[in-house]
Amino acid sequence: MIQNSKLLEMYRQMLTIRFFEEQVFELYGENLVPGTIHLYAGEEAVAVGVCANLRRDDYITSTHRGHGHCIAKGARLDKTMAEILGRKTGYCKGKGGSMHIADFSIGMLGATAVVGAGIPIATGAGLSVKLRSTDQVVVCFFGEGASNQGTFHEGLNLAAVWRLPVVFVCENNLYAMGTRQSRVMLVDNVADRAACYRIPGVVVDGNDVLAAYEATHEAVARARRGEGPTLLECKTYRLKGHSRFDPATYRPKKEVEEWLGKESIARFQTKLLEMSVLTEAEIQEIVQDVRHEVESATKFALDSPFPESYEALDDVYASEESAAQK
Amino acid sequence: MREVTIRDALREALREEMRRDKSVFLLGEDIGRYWGGAFGVTKGLAEEFGDERVRDTPISENAIIGVGVGAAITGMRPVAEIMFGDLTALAVDQICNQAAKIRYMFGGQVGVPLVIRTPFGAGVNIASHHSQSLEAWFMHTPGLFVAAPSTPYDAKGLLKTAIRGSNPVLFVEHKLLYPVKGLVPDEEYAVPFGVGEVKREGNDVTVVATLYMVHKALNAAEQLYKEGISAEVVDPRTLSPLDTKSIVESVKKTGRLVVVTEDCKTAGVSAEIAAVVAEEALDYLDAPIKRVAEPDTPIPFSPSMEKFVIPSETSIVQAVKKVVSKAN
């Protein structure tokens, strides 16, 4: 049984991600976000359900659609928002942006925008855990599109033969940009591929935060016991298109409506009300609170300076050798 | 001082660093107890440090480097071996997009102390997929260092610096150099990055050479000396960072430059070195810069053709004579 306080925390986190993403979307419309954005809205149950099982010293790797992973792992909203807005106070001092946020202080090993590239990196973090003999766990987030990359095969095979403590979490949102899964894969479930590596492959409703939590709980426990990796596939759906300018016309209306009916936050909220973990009044309170938090993070970001342009020259190399360079 | 081969010098560096620091470990294809590395560099290390720290991998180059990256950003110091330099192509995403960029794009939060050892170079008739010299690809990658030793002393000292540093390093070995002997000190030492070395002093012409070409350049210099031409041979030792200062200083002294590298001429290592001198010391040149490099082909198989495309001592001698013959 999950404690009520934990359930409330998960609910709150899901709202935080949703409001944060709505805010990013709005700021983008006001031309305050350089480049592009890939919103996590709609997939909150995965990041929150998965990360609720992790300790601060556990690791995650993330993707181009990574804001939700950061927040669920415990990243600060203000520094996340500042990074997305390209400010000096951002997590990466404005060098990474939306697609490259990292916070090594909480085990968030960074988002890579090369689809599937995080898989071997997460495997390496798992090897590091094993060689250092700690009981940390690594969660590797990626999409179903990444499961068609060679890195998926190479990484899962290695993690399996070396029995590394890695939970591979496939967020299957059905579309790789505009390409529907069925057009490029003959298997219905990415998790079916786990059989090739003789590791457990589990499919869960990725819009059910408790299902994601429970499945991860078991996978994380296996990993901590030294029993190796799990491939966990969470079926979910983007609320919006692939990136900012994508109206997602390739998704049939009926399908979109069907998935809207399975929207994760509303479902969890109903469940919490039924369980009497939450009251309508408390919902209002939490909503207000989270809105306020997102607002102040946004204010922090907007009030923050941009980096000086010459700071582009910093951080290419760690200093010890650059001293030898001159 | 002891005389050892480059193969032994590299192994000594690995062994000493593994003894010194538990976070150093090795991974690669057939580097363990059953083979000891395709060129024998890691022979005996699995026996001393165990299979966990001298780790055989499947044939998954991109994952070898990716795993190295993941381990490097979580407290370990992996030394990955890619069996042949040509196969780095399979791992270019992890080398160039991940290892080299992680520190930068994450705002300096973390270093990536990953060393990637790999042999480049032709000369043993193993054709296009096992012979190329691709150093320039990696010199062109900010965030990555490229070491290219030509002697046992440099190989051991540079590998130690690479392992102890916080930056990813592509550590180039030349497959013809493994059996080459030279002196290494008994005591502890390291060779810093970005510091080239004059391997032979001279006054008439500067010959900048890398890796195996250093030895060919030295032989050519000896021959030229007998003919009354004094060539200075400069070995940059690391291509990134590149010790432009030593090269420029030498050119200012001699007034002439020949660059000898085994990689393709176009946009190659020799192009970068020539460009640096053109930018910084053009006024000191008494003759046009001459490059001796691979003539922009893949490496052919048949011995006579392979020999034809690899810079030879004769071609170095000819190039030097050409620039020296130019009137002051």
Image: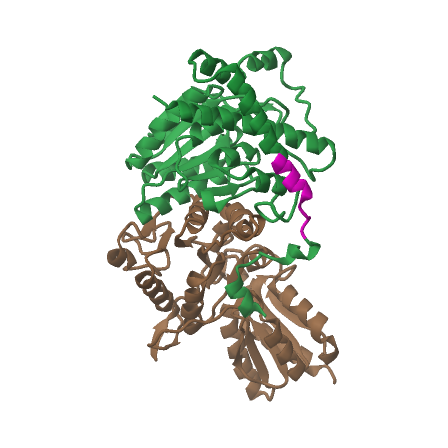
Chain colours: A green, B brown
Residue A244 painted magenta:
no
Residue situated in front as seen by the camera: A280 or A59: A280
- Magenta region, mostly helix, strand or loop? helix
Magenta stretch in the rendered image: A296-307
Q: Where is residue B311 in the image (x, y as percent from the top left)?
A: 56, 68
- Left or right placement of residue A223 versus residue A110 in this view: left
**Image quarter of the C terminus of chain B:** bottom right
Q: Name above or below for residue B315 compared with residue A58.
A: below
Q: Position of residue B61 (x, y in %)?
A: 44, 46
Q: Can residue B319 be seen in this view?
A: no
Q: How many labels does the image show?
A: 0
**Image quarter of the N terminus of chain B:** bottom left
- Left or right placement of residue A325 versus residue A52 in this view: right
Q: Position of residue A185 (x, y in %)?
A: 51, 23
* Residue positioned 28% across, 35% down in the render: A225
* Residue positioned 53% across, 45% down in the render: B93
